């Protein structure tokens, strides 16, 4: 009888772990079903509005970022980087950019305990809003930069 309870308990634990993994995978897959399409005019218009309202104060009206964005401020944090082609935004796949925007600079997109002024926007913006902002940002990159970032996306999705 005791071994049967142990077996049932073990099966329940396995079922719980599998269910949690499936739910977590589904949430991630749900986030990835959308995309930042820099050719979608409706998405770009929405993205521009949201960017201007929530992002431009730090990242600049023209995506230029803050001055000396590679040098730490007195508080040890880095200034907001540019999102134009002079920054490193395009070096990242869309899912990383989405994750940073939604959850902030936390693992797996930053080291544990990394301090930044970049907020997590998950309580303010819908996923579709975040994708629209990313589309708006990407629409400002030169064609060659868009192509290189698309290759980074392709490699990330393999």
Image (tube, rainbow, N blue to C red):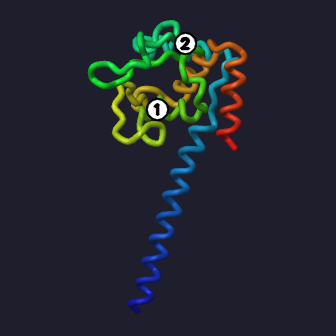
User: Is the N terminus in the top left, top right, bottom left or bottom right quadrant?
Assistant: bottom left
Locate residue 88 relative to residue 71 in the image: left or right. Answer: right
| Residue 60, position as x, y percentages in the image | 46, 10
The answer to whether marks 1 and 2 mark residues whose Cβ atoms lie closer than 8 Å is no
Q: Is 63 on the left or on the right of 106, as rendered?
A: right
Q: Secondary structure at mark 1?
A: helix
Which quadrant of the rendered structure holds the C terminus?
Answer: top right
As drawn, the label of residue 43 is none
- When asked about the image quadrant of residue 133, the answer is top right
Q: Position of residue 40 (x, y in %)?
A: 68, 18
Judge left or right: residue 91 versus residue 7.
Answer: right
- Disc number for residue 48: 2
Indicate the secondary structure of the residue bearing disc 2: helix
Residue 5 screen position, x and y as percent:
41, 84
The residue closer to the viewer here, 17 or 5, is 17
Which residue is disc 1 drawn over? 102
In the depicted structure, whether residue 88 falls above or below residue 151: above
Residue 113: x percent and y percent?
34, 39
Q: Residue at x 59, y 16 (%)?
A: 136
């Amino acid at each position: 009888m005791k071994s049967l309870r142990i077996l049932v308990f073990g099966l329940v634990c396995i079922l719980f772990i599998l269910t949690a993994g499936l739910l977590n995978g589904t949430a991630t897959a749900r986030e990835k079903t959308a995309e930042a399409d820099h050719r979608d005019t409706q998405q770009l218009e929405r993205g521009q509005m949201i960017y201007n309202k929530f992002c431009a104060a730090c990242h600049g009206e023209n995506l230029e970022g803050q001055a000396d964005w590679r040098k730490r401020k007195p508080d040890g944090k880095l200034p907001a980087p540019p999102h134009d082609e002079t920054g490193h935004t395009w070096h990242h796949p869309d899912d990383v950019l989405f994750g940073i925007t939604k959850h902030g600079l936390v693992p797996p997109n930053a080291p544990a305990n990394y301090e930044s002024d970049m907020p997590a926007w998950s309580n303010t913006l819908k996923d579709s809003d975040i994708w629209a902002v990313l589309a708006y940002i990407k629409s400002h990159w030169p064609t060659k930069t868009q192509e290189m970032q698309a290759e980074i996306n392709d490699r990330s999705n393999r």
